[in-house]
Image: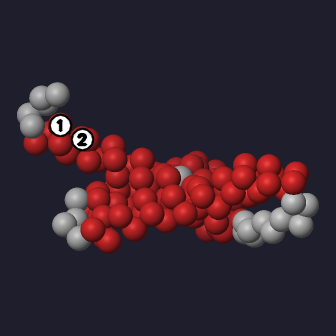
Amino acid sequence: MSTALITLLAPIISDIVKRVAPDRDQAANIEREVKLTLLDKEEALQNMAGKIVLAEAQSGNWLTASWRPLLMLTVVAIIACNYLLFPIIGIFYPAMITLALPAELWNLLTIGVGGYVVGRSGEKMVNSYTQGGQK
């Protein structure tokens, strides 16, 4: 994710730095510092997101701990119906209805799976750390 942010902002940063600092060496130093700062901030955002997912997973409330997995299971069920179940049923019943699958749903699935992976990794690291490296 951090490389995506830098890739997105790199041309904008270069243009602004060239306008502000006409000296090439100074411009290169400024651009490098801005990119390093972006990397640090992006890493901090990822760490915060991981902590949020970890706190949700460790919550005593069933709904708080389960909403993300339930949402991901729902998305996976829609995908399975559209691409596995409905095509097979469509062989026998050609007028089969399929569920619309907008691009935002794919984004949600990607973010959700990424958050789940970060949360589970964080949870395992915390457990390992609290148990003194046991296991």
**What is the distance, in whole Å, between disc 1 and disc 2 at their CAs?**
5 Å
| Colouring scheme, one of rainbow, by chain, secondary structure, one colour | secondary structure
* Figure disc tally: 2
Q: Quadrant of residue 81?
A: bottom right
Look at the image and tell me whether residue 90 can be seen.
Answer: yes
In the structure shown, which secondary structural element does the residue marked by tag 2 occupy? helix
User: Which residue lies under the disc numbered 2?
Assistant: 125
- Tell me the number on the disc at residue 24: none
Residue extending furthest toward the front = 92
Look at the image and tell me whether residue 34 can be seen.
Answer: no
Residue at position x 35%, y 56% from top?
50
Q: Nearer the viewer, residue 19 or 94?
A: 94
Residue at position x 72%, y 52% from top?
85
- Tell me the number on the disc at residue 128: 1
Q: Nearer the viewer, residue 124 or 8?
A: 124
Q: Quadrant of residue 131?
A: top left
